[in-house]
């Protein structure tokens, strides 16, 4: 019997969905939203839920062998000195559609001048000025994994040109141009939109700094759906305030929740969305977990296995 601990703010929903699957040899022994509910003597072999809740309990789980994250990011489990003697899989391949809705919703917001149209409405002004168009625009994707690939496909649907920045050498047929590690400055040229999808790792920390933002055209709009740690926030704020960037949309931040007195709140051409771009959808995550569980119990390799040394 494989014993499962569910630790999530959506513990009840996940528990019901997993039980409905009747997965062979699996027993849910704890389902909770509170780390304090898990005792030192817990015999859980599998841990499922949100990584942000895990650090407190990992030292207690002596039988732990596999952790399934309901998030794509697993930053809380990668800190120096953290336990690493288990298999860690994250959620991939399930966030692309929601991320595309978010990113292209905002791109359309800017191109269609929706804020300006509403402001004209409030003034009773008939605004017949032309809209922009996505056709022919160039979008740069920092990170072209499963989410980046979905964004690229959506961009192609709108007739956009797609440039990608990646560490991998795998051919990426859905991109018009590909730039690799060490070519960030070259990547930054000729873009209309930049979308950051990079994971939070040692090598990406503060990678998007003042040099990067100053290399972009002043008409660029920057959208961050990756990790807040990849952006030097003061440099971004200065680029926005000085007009070196047209606007930015930030869903993620170095510190979350963003403190009430943080300087980013008051920048007028910055839009803050409080890490809501693509929440985990329990049925999708349980589909992923069920597939991984069958692989786990039959000693097959687990997809979406996190490399602790790489951070993703």
Image: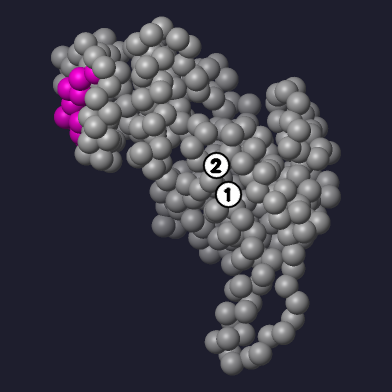
Cα separation between marks 2 and 1: 6 Å
* Few, some or many residues within 10 Å of mark 1 (<14, 14–19, 20+): many
Q: Which residue shows up at 66% across the image and 52% down it?
A: 222
Q: Is residue 308 visible?
A: yes
Q: Is residue 82 visible?
A: no
Residue 160 is covered by the magenta coloring: no
The span picked out in magenta is 26-37
Q: Which mark is residue 100?
A: 1
> Measured along the vertical axis of the image, is residue 102 above or below residue 89?
below
Q: In which quarter of the view is residue 4 placed? A: top left
Is residue 130 rendered to the left or right of residue 38? right
> Measured along the vertical axis of the image, is residue 288 above or below residue 300?
below
Q: Which residue shows up at 68% across the image and 43% down it?
A: 152
**Does the residue at mark 2 contact the one at mark 1 (Cβ under 8 Å)?**
yes
Foreground pick, 270 / 69: 69
Instruction: Point out residue 261 in the picture as x, y percentages from the top left corner.
Output: 44, 57
Residue 31 is covered by the magenta coloring: yes
Q: In which quarter of the view is residue 37 placed? A: top left
Foreground pick, 175 / 35: 175
Secondary structure of the residue carrying tag 2 is helix
- All told, the count of numbered labels is 2
Instruction: Point out residue 106 in the picture as x, y percentages from the top left corner.
Output: 60, 60
Q: Which mark is residue 96?
A: 2
Q: Quadrant of the C terminus?
A: top right
Q: Which mark is residue 81?
A: none
Its colouring scheme is one colour
Q: Which residue shows up at 41% across the image and 48% down it?
A: 257
Q: Residue furthest top?
A: 299
Q: Which residue shows up at 66% across the image and 35% down it?
A: 144
Q: Quadrant of the N terminus?
A: top left
């Amino acid at each position: 019997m494989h014993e499962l601990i569910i630790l999530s703010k959506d513990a009840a929903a996940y528990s019901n969905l997993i039980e409905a699957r009747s997965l062979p040899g699996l027993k849910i022994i704890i389902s909770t939203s509170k780390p304090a509910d898990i005792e030192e003597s817990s015999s859980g072999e599998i841990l499922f839920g949100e990584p942000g809740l895990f650090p407190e309990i990992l030292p207690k789980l002596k039988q732990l062998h596999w952790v399934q994250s309901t998030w794509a990011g697993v930053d809380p489990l990668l800190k120096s000195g953290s336990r690493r003697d288990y298999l860690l899989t994250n959620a991939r391949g399930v966030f692309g559609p929601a991320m595309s809705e978010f990113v292209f919703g905002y791109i359309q917001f800017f191109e269609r001048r929706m804020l300006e149209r509403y402001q004209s409405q409030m003034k009773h002004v008939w605004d017949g000025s032309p809209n922009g168009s996505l056709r022919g625009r160039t979008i740069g994707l920092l990170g072209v994994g499963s989410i980046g690939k979905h964004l690229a496909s959506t961009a192609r649907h709108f007739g956009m040109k797609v440039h990608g920045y990646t560490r991998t050498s795998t051919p990426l047929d859905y991109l018009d141009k590909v730039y690799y590690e060490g070519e960030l400055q070259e990547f930054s040229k000729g873009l209309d939109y930049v979308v950051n999808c990079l994971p939070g790792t040692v090598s990406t920390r503060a990678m998007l700094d003042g040099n990067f933002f100053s290399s972009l055209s002043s008409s660029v709009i920057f959208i961050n759906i990756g990790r807040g740690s990849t952006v030097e926030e003061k440099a971004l704020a200065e680029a926005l305030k000085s007009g070196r960037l047209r606007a930015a949309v930030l869903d993620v931040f170095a510190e979350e929740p963003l403190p009430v007195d943080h300087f980013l709140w008051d920048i007028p051409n910055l839009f803050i969305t409080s890490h809501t771009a693509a929440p985990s959808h329990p049925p999708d995550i349980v589909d992923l977990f069920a597939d991984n569980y069958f692989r786990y119990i039959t000693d097959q390799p687990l997809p979406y296995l996190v490399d602790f040394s790489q951070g993703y």
